[in-house]
Image (cartoon, grey):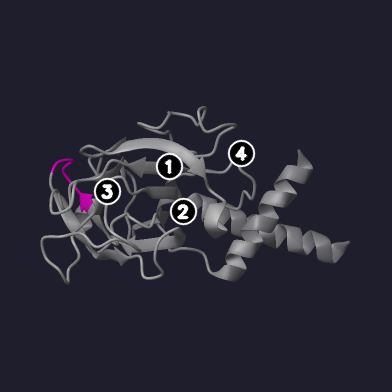
Amino acid sequence: MLRSCVLAAGVLAACGAANAAIITQWDFNGQSATTVPGGGTSPTPSIGAGTASLLASVTGSFSSGIANGGSSDPVTTSPPNFGWQTTTYPAQGAGSGTAGVRFDISTVGVLGPDLYAYFDVRHSNTSSRFVQVQYTTDGTTFTNAPGGLFEATAGGDTWYKLRQVNLGADPLVFNNANFGFRVVTVFDPGTPGSYSAASTTYAGTGTLRFDMVTLDTQPIPEPASAALLAAGAMLSRRRR
């Protein structure tokens, strides 16, 4: 019994510490694909406050968060586990760095030294092979995030989990009501002026499905910590 209590205390402490680090998170979960809070145009956060929006011609809806191996969301059934499905991207050779999803989140009161943005994304076969994370400190001008160019190296119909950038090197990201970041499709760096597809031939009708979009003052938890957090969630549910 004592051992169980000690374990529970450790689990709850780890869970509390991790939750305290999360500023805002979107898990895009709901009772059905048509009742996810906020809808496909501007889904609402599951933790914290912020605004999600679509860029350029992109349209949004919700699809399974467990297909093709699933995202990092610990919820293992769909519903309620969904991802934000986006499509209607630019035609070949047009609009690099303009189309995707945007997240505006106030960091007022957040003083650093680190600020992590991370997310899961599922590329379809015809989607852009490359996406770029960009951030803004004035709500208007966006800068490429260091280490923020990501490639679908395993092809399409695949989840790429916990893509992460640390934006803390720029002091302007802290204590800033105008902070935001976005994930946009970009041309293949090896073939300037054109998109490469994740697997087949690029098409603007290809899809990117996002899940577990998070702004955090700590990096992604190590596997052991993640296991503790999952156990903490189970303990919390049992107490209700």
Label number found at residue 130: none
The answer to whether 209 is drawn above or below residue 188 in the figure is above
Q: Which residues are magenta?
A: 135-140
Please say if the residues under marks 2 and 4 sit with CB atoms less than 8 Å apart: no
Question: Can residue 36 be spotted in the picture?
Answer: yes
- Residue 7: x and y in percent read 75, 63
Q: Earlier in the sequence, mark 3 or mark 4?
A: 4
Real-space Cα separation, disc 1 to disc 2, in angstroms: 23 Å
Viewport quadrant of the N terminus: bottom right
Question: Would you name the residue on which mark 4 appears?
Answer: 79
Q: Earlier in the sequence, mark 3 or mark 2?
A: 2
Location of residue 219 by image quarter: bottom left
Where disc 4 sits, the SS reads loop
- What amino acid type is highlighted by mark number 4? Pro
Please say if the residues under marks 3 and 4 sit with CB atoms less than 8 Å apart: no
- What amino acid type is highlighted by mark number 3? Arg
Real-space Cα separation, disc 3 to disc 2, in angstroms: 20 Å
Residue 139 is inside the magenta segment: yes
Label number found at residue 21: 2
- Residue 6: x and y in percent read 77, 63
Question: Can residue 51 be spotted in the picture?
Answer: no
Real-space Cα separation, disc 3 to disc 4, in angstroms: 26 Å
Q: Earlier in the sequence, mark 2 or mark 4?
A: 2
Label number found at residue 84: 1
Q: How many marks?
A: 4
